Image (spheres, coloured by chain):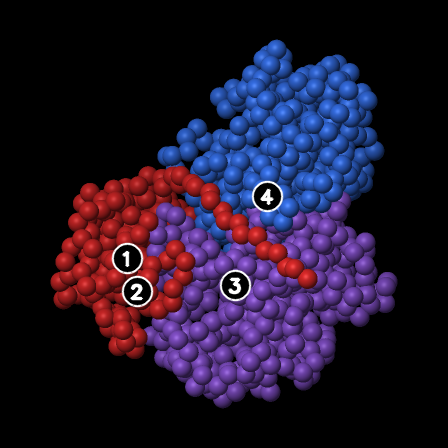
Amino acid sequence: MNGEIGVAGVAIHAPPRTDSRSLEESIYAVTWAALRDGGFDIDDVEGIVVAGNDELDGRAIAVMMASGPVGGVDRDILSTPSAAEHAFVLAALRIASGQFANQLVVAWNPLEVDSFSDALKVGTDPYFHRALPQDELATHGLQAAVLEAKVPGVREAATAIVRKNRIQGAIAYPDRSIGVMETVFIASGRPTRWPLTDTMVAPPAFGLVAMILGSKEYLSGRKVKNVSWIRGLGWATEPGFIGDRDLSTVPSLDAARKQAYRAAGVKDASTFDVAEIADATPYQELLAYEGLGICKRNAWIKHVASGATARGGKLPVNLSGGALSFNPVFCAGLVRIAEAANQVRGRAGNHQVPNARRALAHAASGPAMHYNTVVVMEGGRS
Amino acid sequence: MKPPRVGIIGIGQSEFKARRDDANYPELVREGVTLALADAKRELKDMDAVVYSLAPDALLGIGNAERLGVDAVGARNKRFMRINTGGATGISSVITGWTHIASGECDIVLVAGADKVGESGDSQTILNKIWDPTYERALPLGTITMLAMSAVRAMHKYGLTEEDMARVTVKNRANAAKNPKAHLRKVVTMQEVMASRYIAWPIKLLDACPQSSGGAAVVMASEKYIKANKLDAVWVSGVGHCSESYYMGDRMGKKIMADHADAHALARSFERSYKMAGIKNPTKQVHVAELYAPFSNTEYHAIEAAGVCKLGGSLAMMREGFFDLGGKIPVNPSGGTLCTNAIAVSALVRAAEVTLQVWGRAGEHQVKGARVGIASGNGGDHQFFGTMVIES
Amino acid sequence: MELIKRKESWNIGYDHALGETASYFFARVRDHAEIYGRRDPKSGRVLVPPRAFSDQTLEPTTDWVKVGPGGRIEAFTIVYEEFKTLPNPPYAFGYVLLDGADTAIGGFFRGIDLTDPAKAAKQLAIGTRVSTRFADERKGSVLDFWFELEGKRGKGGKSGGETAVGYE
């Protein structure tokens, strides 16, 4: 990719109420928050990429309503409804193309739909599978079931990850993180999509995230401090029909990792100081450990038990609490990238890793990690 | 630093029809892809990335339908993302393909999609849902009524008449008759258009686009790749987007930035594309145009937004045949969106058709000597606009 | 060779928060039969319907401005075709610039004979003065009001003599 691109403004919002502001107004708020975080004004913005899910938003073309609050009028604005993190990828590509010096990226996950399950269930194909109760959570459950069959004892590691992320979430965002932390409670939850229990996942939350990206020339010219430089970017997809996949593996994550690590010159995950990784379910975080080169499945249980990926460990994962603590489903992946960026920007608040220089972000969206995006970021001077 | 030059090395499009009961959605996507790959003399495995063109999920009845298209476009374990800017999706997707290559990240990209608008039952019912529930969802707005209102304002501002509108249909149908891929290919007369029934005044049945089904794709590559593989190509010299306020009522009244009679943001988008392409005088420098216009009246403000004449000036020029296939600047020699509208890919087809034109491969609807062409796409409630300049 | 088709429909409900600005607008419509706009301080435009911020300037809007009930037609269309879940044709609707507003608001036009399109179009020509009429029983929706040609006094409630267009 041409040139250097950095993240220079970040805002992650978890509005406490869903009835006081219209979605448009909430998007307006997170947009301004990210601009102010980076010291920018809307007039500085040259282009925008947004991402929303039509079925969750209740709008046939989500970007129409959303264009206003993000400053889309008279600007070049695109929308990537496949995944929130794709908006980040496209924004980076748009700057690298030389067409723009900066980009605003905004994504959201509203809670206005009567049934999350029904809204996401229409993603199942009508040709063969729509009649089945296959919503997104059910597919995550299928993935967990396959792993349980293939990796003996994996549930112990999964439970430990839930506990880890919940404890971390309670430190990072005590007001927004929810969910049980005690092992015995996590383990004794009510099955929701077996083997997933209601304690192993967080319910959908209202969330929004916005970021400003800029080229090195642009950010240097504006003397912006606290930049997270993108060193490597990779993204790839699984096939759509679940039956075509081996749910115990995630080859698209391998592909995305290879792209990102190659670009960043990363040979080994031990180079990272901190990581934010997809954890819609704890099984996803485990699969990501393998896919990102952190730890293979035959060592999952030991690795997690050792605390290596917990706060204070060699490579702390999901100090923000992850989606297991705060789950703005559609934009949870972009939140991972934002959280990782904040670590190397030195803006991660109570969950800041001291002197974090290199961060790994992994976003997965769709049923059973359908889309995988990997971002390697670095702070300090380029 | 100068971005790498990006070329289009192949295109493919279905023969668009009302319904395709013989193919499900992923199969239609594959149809466009197969044609484009053959045209580019490439295989699926050659692609570095795929940009997936898909407008509202609701028209297909499948949420995030692009996931079902992953295998149709050979994207398993590859870079893949979907674009949705409403009706402009197709051109936004091609431009995003340009971005993938110009960024230095990819050498060769497939841009593909399909639509089955006829299967949605009644597209206006779904398109009514694009308006926001806060104020306007309760009104019977649809893309037809929205653009009927644009016609009404153009009648008031510029003296547009129903005959002016009919003239566009007559021109485009005559062009579509020469285009084997077009959906509506029957030649019609002014009298037939004027006699067709009103849908939303002043738009009559024959002033309106059909609901089409089919797939389309383009293959794009960097100059480096094209040279290394000794491929033939045409070049993307300019890209741009711009958008307007979602509120149509803001495009009326006082102190307006954009009038609903015109396509102000389309003009701004063309300005951006022209700047990149070094086009300072479109009237002299542009040889052919494929401008997204699903209703006859909208072709006029698209032409004016392309900077070919001043606001209101296109009416007289249309009467004089300026935009006919044999005219000075043929507009929509393929028949345009008015004759074929598979929403998710209609704007992609505009880019594909311009590609054929400047390549000299447009067969019976070829514009003689065309070397520089422009394409546009419109989306949302006349809100999102994408434009390209493509030349040989 | 048998080609099979399957019928599917989406049945997804939503509870959309309207926010304070739109809520105030609808409460005034419902309780006082009044229409309000909000001023964008940067451009000076009174936006109707009101929004918390201007999408052009991205500045928050400031004061409330009562607008109408008179206004002028800025755009219209007359629908003669039937579409699922939309009203039975013919019906006319469009956008009206209410007195005091700088942007136009959408609504139905009633009390006009729509049988002859050309005649009806002349009556609805851009610039024609209209008056806002309110339903006797209002729910807090844009369907609580509609527009009639100024000088014509229609009845309250559902407009008499014309297709009733109230629908949920």
Give the quarter of the figure containing the C terminus of chain B: bottom right
Q: For this rendering, which residue is in front, B297 or C166?
A: C166
| Element at label 3 | strand
Amino acid bearing label 2: Tyr
The CA span between labels 1 and 4 is: 36 Å
For disc 3, the neighbor class at 10 Å (few under 14, some 14 to 19, many from 20) is: many
Amino acid bearing label 4: Arg
**Labels 2 and 4 touching (C-beta < 8 A):** no
Q: Nearer the viewer, mark 1 or mark 4?
A: 4
Q: Nearer the viewer, mark 2 or mark 3?
A: 2
| Element at label 1 | loop
Chain painted purple: B
Question: In the orientation shown, which residue stands out farthest toward the front?
Answer: C1
| Element at label 4 | loop
Q: Are marks 2 and 4 on the same chain?
A: no
Chain of the residue where label 3 is placed in the rendered structure: B
Residue of label 3: B378
The CA span between labels 4 and 3 is: 32 Å
The percent position of residue B336, horizontal first and vertical second, equals: 57, 73
Q: Which mark is residue C165?
A: 1
At x 73%, y 70%, the residue is: B234
Chain of the residue where label 2 is placed in the rendered structure: C
Residue of label 4: A130
- Look at chain C in the picture and name its colour: red
Amino acid bearing label 1: Val
Q: Is residue B106 visible?
A: yes
At x 67%, y 67%, the residue is: B13
Q: Are marks 1 and 3 on the same chain?
A: no
- Look at chain A in the picture and name its colour: blue
Is residue C88 depicted above or below A356 in this figure?
Answer: below
